[in-house]
Every structure is written in C-alpha cells, then in structure tokens.
C-alpha cells in the first residue's frame, strides 16, 4: 500500500514538472507571438505611411503636370503675340526706283534689300502673367529661347543692313540728263549773228 502511495507521489511530481515545463514553453511562445504581432503591426503602419506618401506624390505630380501644361500654353501664346507685334512694328523702307539704264538684276537686288528697324521687343521681357514661383526653371528656359530669338533677329537685320550699304557703295550715282545738256544761255550765238549779217549785206 505504501509503495502505491509513493508511486503516485512520484507520478504527481513528474506531472507537476511537466506542467511547469509546459507553462514555461507556453509563456515563451506567447512572448514570441506578441513580439511578432507587434513587429507586423509596425511594418503595416510603415507600409500605410509609405502608401499615403506615394499617393500624395502622385497627386502633386498631377498638379505639376497641369501647371506645366498651362505654362506651355501661355509660353506659346506669348511667343505668338510677340511675333505678331514684331511683324506689325517692322516698316520696310520705300523701294527706291531704279533708273532705266540699270540692269534688271540690279533692280531685283535693290528690291530685295530693305532696311527694317530693329524691333522694340529686343529690350522687353516676357509677360508677367506667366511667372510662377514654383516654375523658375521653366521660366528661365522660356527667357533663354526668347533672348536667342531676339539676338538672331538683330543679327539678321544687321547683316541685311551691311549688304544694303555694300550694294549702295557699288552702285554709281545717277547723273541727271539735264546736268549734261547745254542750256540756251550757254550757247554761243556769235557765229549765228555773223552769218545773219552777211546775208543781209
């Protein structure tokens, strides 16, 4: 009887030891699960923040694209208006009449070379309505194109002026026919009078 009691006590001790071991394992697993859950929640929060940031960037890019499109339209409109204004301001000189003794090729050259005043837009800047604080680089690009266009026009005008001046220097001055003709006052009437007197005698 005593042996059975001792055996049961030993079994109870073993079971208690197993219980303690299982409780320790359970606590360890619970801790691991809790840590994994916390880690997953942190990663999920980070992913949500990144997604929100990406969505904001996409929205900002859409707004910037709209602004760039509007600026491009304004730039094209400004260039068109500037060209129209430059065309209206250009007033070619009256074509000089070539004398009949000059060759037809000379007349065509005279007609081709005309002096044109330099457009006033060379010292003007772009319209103020296209200036945008958030688009400084685009504005600088537009200004650069504008200045290059004006410089090209000025060089073209100067080249035409030089060609016109060179052509004028090569063309001899035209003398009026009246400058080479003798006037009645310059005629010598003495021989005529002597002949008249002889006939009278």
Image (cartoon, grey):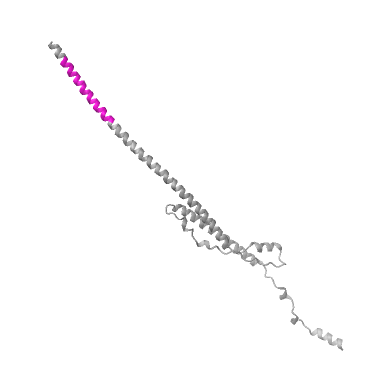
Left or right of residue 51: residue 68: right
Q: Position of residue 128 (x, y in %)?
A: 46, 58
Q: Residue at x 38, y 42 (%)?
A: 53
Magenta residue span: 8-33
Name which residue lies at 54% across and 56% down.
Answer: 80
Rendered location of residue 145, percent (x, y)? 51, 55
Residue furthest out toward the bottom: 201
Q: Split into 4 quadrants, where in the image is the C terminus?
A: bottom right
Q: Quadrant of residue 161?
A: bottom right
Q: Specify the quadrant that holds the N terminus.
A: top left
Instruction: Give the answer, above or below, for where 100 lies relative to 126.
Output: below
The answer to whether 199 is drawn above or below residue 71 in the figure is below
Q: How many marks?
A: 0
- Residue sitting at 69 percent across and 61 percent down? 105
Q: Is residue 12 above or below residue 188?
A: above
Q: Nearer the viewer, residue 192 or 25?
A: 25
Q: Residue furthest top?
A: 1
Question: In the drawing, does residue 75 fall left or right of residue 34?
Answer: right
Residue 178 x %, y %: 72, 75
**Residue 177 at x, y percent in the picture:** 72, 73
At x 68% / y 63%, what residue is drawn?
A: 107
Instruction: Compare residues 58 and 122 and report the one nearer the observer.
Output: 58
Dominant secondary structure, magenta: helix
Classify residue 42 as left or right of residue 195: left
From the viewer's perspective, is 93 left or right of 2? right
**Residue 128: in magenta span:** no
């Amino acid at each position: 009887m005593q042996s059975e009691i001792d055996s049961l006590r030993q079994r109870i001790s073993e079971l208690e030891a197993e219980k303690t071991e299982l409780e320790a394992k359970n606590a360890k697993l619970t801790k691991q699960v809790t840590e994994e859950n916390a880690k997953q929640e942190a990663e999920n929060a980070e992913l949500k923040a990144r997604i929100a940031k990406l969505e904001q960037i996409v929205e900002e890019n859409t707004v910037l694209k709209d602004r760039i499109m509007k600026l491009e339209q304004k730039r094209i409109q400004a260039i068109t208006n500037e060209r129209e204004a430059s065309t209206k301001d250009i007033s070619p000189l009256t074509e000089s009449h070539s004398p009949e003794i000059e060759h037809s090729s000379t007349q065509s050259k005279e007609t081709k070379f005309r002096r044109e005043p330099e457009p006033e837009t060379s010292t003007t800047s772009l319209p103020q309505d296209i200036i945008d604080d958030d688009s400084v680089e685009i504005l600088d690009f537009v200004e650069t194109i504008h200045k290059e266009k004006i410089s090209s026009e000025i060089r073209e005008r100067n080249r035409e002026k030089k060609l016109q001046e060179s052509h004028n220097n090569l063309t001899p001055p035209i003398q009026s026919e009246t400058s080479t003709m003798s006037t009645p006052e310059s005629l010598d009437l003495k021989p005529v009078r002597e002949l008249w007197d002889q006939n009278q005698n």
